[in-house]
Image (cartoon, grey):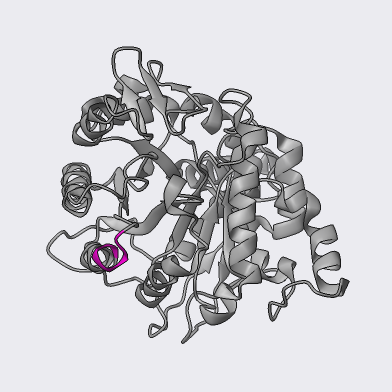
Amino acid sequence: MKKSLFSLVLFIVAVTNMSAQKLIDLEHHFYTKEVMQILSDRKAAGIPPYYDAENGILKPSKEVSIPMLTFSNMIWDLDEKRVEAMDEAGIDMAVLSISPGLEEISEQDNIPAVCRRVNDEIAAYVRQYPTRFRAAITLPVAQVDEAIKEMERCAKMPEFVYWHTHSNYYSNGHLDDDKYFPLLEKAAELGLPVYVHPNIGNEERINEFGGAMPGAGYGYAVDVMTTTLRLICKGVFDKLPNLHVFIGHFGEFYPFVLKRMTAHFSRIPGNPSPLQTIEYYLKHNICVTTSGVFDPAVYEMTKTKLGIDHIVFGSDYPYEEPKDAVAFVKSLDFENDAERAALFEENVKAFVGADFDNFNPSQVHGTRVNAQDSTSYTVGGQPAAESTKGIIIQNGNKTIK
């Protein structure tokens, strides 16, 4: 009888702990209606990116068409409907980030002002639902000086927790181009992580096959990996050791080729020479999300290669079904409650270094970790070490610095 009662108590405690955990969605997309109008207005000139509102087609490049009718109402619902969709899926909080298009426009002088309005609109939405949302910063990357000003402005606002950008900017080059280094440098200085979201690349051999091959079926992974690998090889993380980057889809192909990449980049003459191995940067500067890959074998592989403390939840709303994304992570075979808590919420809180539990719109960030801060965190049930150089998370043998 006593044994049965004890088992019942343990069960109740476990259920209580699980129910108290938040599921934080790091990749939850939106468009504002103003941005969609700007993209629609570009159709007449036929210059990508543009949106064909009549047919519901987004044209990120001349070769690729993305049907948006399935997502159109969901992606610009900045109202109670989005909250209801989260409730239905089982998502407690989400970080809102803009979908591709606005960053890639360089020839319009009004883009910095548009970005400011986008950030103000999404910040107002966060303030309307402070227990449900935070936001990512949208920047006019083609105008670097203006982008830095806007990053500095938004970094002071508790609504924003990272800068969301893309692996390339169409005709404006790639994130790893030297001209964009000041943006990465400023992000590191401010303690802002950078989410490198995939974009349609400009490889003709890939782009000629419709939307799947250059997009989510293959090309997205190639473009994100090429951009982040070039950041590594160009020594960006050596110059900015406190720069933290998110990438989606369980790190694209990285977990599967990491051993081979690390070996060959270190022993073949003539290769770029970052100070550390490729594996080092994946385990110190990069965190991956679960977005769009509902395969437990991929989770296990990523956990083995990168560690549980480098994985966070991302739904990729509305491009993936949020119910499926939630059902997948809840079905994973966690070794203990600490692992579950790490993936659901603790890793996000530690890696981002912002407050997801308390919100005061009258105050600037008080918990952001940057190069000058020294803050202690708990991740996966383990205390994190203090650092004067940024976040250090100790969980087993894995460390994020």
Which residue appears farthest toward the top when viewing the image? Answer: 55
Residue occupying the point 49% across, 50% down: 168
Q: Nearer the viewer, residue 107 or 117?
A: 107
Above or below, 219 against 62 in this view is: below
Q: Nearer the viewer, residue 358 or 316?
A: 316
Residue occupying the point 50% across, 42% down: 199
Q: Is residue 65 left or right of residue 364?
A: right
Query: Which portion, as a residue range, is magenta?
Result: 143-147
Residue 236 position by quadrant: bottom right
Q: Nearer the viewer, residue 392 or 236?
A: 236
Which residue appears farthest toward the front when viewing the image? Answer: 45
Residue occupying the point 52% across, 62% down: 176
Task: Return the x and y of residue 121 as percentages of the image width and height.
Answer: 17, 44
Task: Return the x and y of residue 115 as percentages of the image width and height.
Answer: 23, 50
Quick one: quadrant of the C terminus? bottom right
Task: Return the x and y of residue 134 as percentages of the image width and height.
Answer: 31, 50
Which residue appears farthest toward the left when viewing the image? Answer: 362
Q: Is residue 287 left or right of residue 85?
A: right
Task: Return the x and y of residue 6 as percentages of the image width and height.
Answer: 63, 45
Tell me the chief SS of the magenta region. helix
Q: Nearer the viewer, residue 274 or 358?
A: 274
The answer to whether residue 331 is visible is no
Q: Is residue 351 left or right of residue 100?
A: right
Check if residue 145 falls in the magenta segment: yes
Check if residue 262 falls in the magenta segment: no
